[in-house]
Image (tube, rainbow, N blue to C red):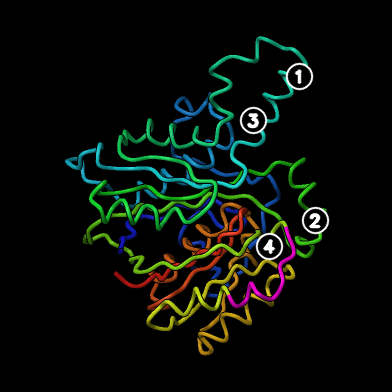
């Protein structure tokens, strides 16, 4: 399966455009933003005033990707899908709604408010804003890019807006920060969106040319894994027929870094290692797509010809993809 990347949209503590990502990869300095991240949007405020911050993060990154892709007016919006993944969804809004229920404040427990608590609320808003009416869903694990590529390859869509979003939640992040497995990590938030096309166009930035993944049994973000995880990662990477110029790794400062590094070096000893989380932080359910956005920007700038991106999700799926020039 192959999918072509037509547009990149990103919001993170270190970058809010593909140009920002390239500047970091080339050694540029950046001042890391405090949490929660402040970001600008080209979406008219009137269209977003009733949305949660979770939705605003996703919609703004999506809008940036859509603008860069410059979708032709004649393309049938019923053939444009929206696939988004998240680890914790609209956790802030969800907690606020639950608190209003517990405290017995019936005025806050309306269907309009409740609809903003579900993970797929961001997909609904993205589709409304852009008029997309194709295959759409939210994933809480796995590779949204691979699923999107499958939909494109089986002619279920012509284009798909694909990405991830994770919203900073102070209470949740404080609890996660106490986990032994996340010691050394800087927890962050972000949104990363890619506009994918089934066919190459004159605007194509690069292509996703292959995928390989497996479940590690548990997520190393939440559990300590034994060395068998390295063997699983090695087997995943051996499925690629050619070596990359660089590997954008999941390294986040935790114990898992050494396991992953050993596995990758055993398969691709000559590849350069790049750790995007040195800049973006550990964005949990958004980490894989954030790394993919870094890779797409790097290919676009001509830094590399072939990149493998890696990351692990909140349920233990270790996902990888090959990104190459279009």
Where the C terminus falls, by quadrant?
A: bottom left
Image position of 67 with respect to 227: above or below:
above
Q: CA distance from mark 3 to mark 4?
A: 27 Å
Q: Which residue is mark 3?
A: 93
Q: Which residue is mark 2?
A: 179
Image position of 107 with respect to 261: above or below:
above
Q: Which residue is mark 1?
A: 102
Q: Earlier in the sequence, mark 4 or mark 2?
A: 2
Dot 1 crowding, Cα within 10 Å, few <14, some 14–19, many 20+: few
Q: CA distance from mark 3 to mark 1?
A: 14 Å
Where the N terminus falls, by quadrant?
A: bottom left
Image position of 67 with respect to 185: above or below:
above
Image position of 111 with respect to 67: above or below:
above
Q: Is residue 245 left or right of residue 216?
A: left
Q: Earlier in the sequence, mark 3 or mark 1?
A: 3
Q: Which residues are magenta?
A: 223-231
Total labels drawn: 4
* Label disc, if present, on residue 220 of the rendered structure: 4
Q: CA distance from mark 3 to mark 2?
A: 24 Å
Q: Say whether residue 52 is visible.
A: yes
Q: Secondary structure at mark 1?
A: helix
Mark 3 or 4, which is nearer the eye? 4
Q: Secondary structure at mark 2?
A: loop
Residue 142: where, in percent of width, then height? 50, 55
Residue 17: where, in percent of width, then height? 48, 56
Q: Residue furthest bottom?
A: 270
Residue 47: where, in percent of width, then height? 44, 27
Q: Is residue 227 left or right of residue 294?
A: right
Q: CA distance from mark 4 to mark 2?
A: 11 Å
């Amino acid at each position: 399966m192959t999918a072509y990347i037509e547009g990149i949209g990103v919001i993170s503590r270190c970058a809010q455009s593909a140009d920002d990502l390239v500047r970091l990869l080339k050694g540029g300095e950046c001042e890391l933003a405090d949490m929660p991240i402040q970001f600008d949007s080209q979406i008219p405020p009137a269209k977003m005033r009733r949305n949660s911050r979770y939705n605003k993060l996703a919609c703004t990154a999506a809008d940036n990707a859509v603008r860069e892709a410059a979708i032709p007016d004649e393309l049938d919006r019923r053939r444009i899908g929206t696939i988004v993944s998240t680890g914790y969804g609209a956790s802030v809004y969800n907690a606020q709604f639950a608190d209003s229920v517990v405290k017995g404040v019936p005025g806050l427990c309306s269907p309009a408010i409740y609809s903003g608590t579900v993970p797929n609320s961001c997909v609904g808003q993205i589709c409304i804003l852009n008029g997309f009416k194709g295959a759409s869903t939210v994933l809480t694990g796995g590779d949204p890019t691979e699923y999107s590529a499958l939909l494109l390859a089986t002619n279920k869509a012509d284009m798909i807006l694909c990405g991830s979003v994770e919203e900073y939640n102070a209470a949740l992040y404080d609890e996660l920060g106490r986990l032994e497995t996340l010691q050394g990590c800087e927890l962050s938030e972000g949104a990363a969106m890619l506009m994918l096309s089934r066919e190459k166009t004159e605007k194509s930035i690069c292509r996703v040319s292959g995928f390989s993944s497996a479940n590690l049994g548990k997520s190393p973000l939440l559990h300590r894994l034994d060395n068998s995880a390295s063997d699983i990662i090695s087997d995943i990477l051996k499925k690629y027929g050619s070596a990359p110029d660089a590997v954008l790794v999941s390294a986040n400062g935790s114990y898992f870094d050494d396991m992953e590094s050993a596995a990758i070096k055993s398969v691709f000893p000559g590849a350069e290692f790049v750790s995007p989380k040195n800049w973006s932080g550990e964005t949990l359910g958004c980490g894989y797509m954030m790394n993919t956005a870094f890779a797409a920007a790097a290919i676009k700038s001509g830094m590399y010809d072939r990149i493998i991106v890696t990351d692990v999700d909140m349920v233990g799926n270790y996902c990888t993809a090959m990104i190459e020039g279009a």
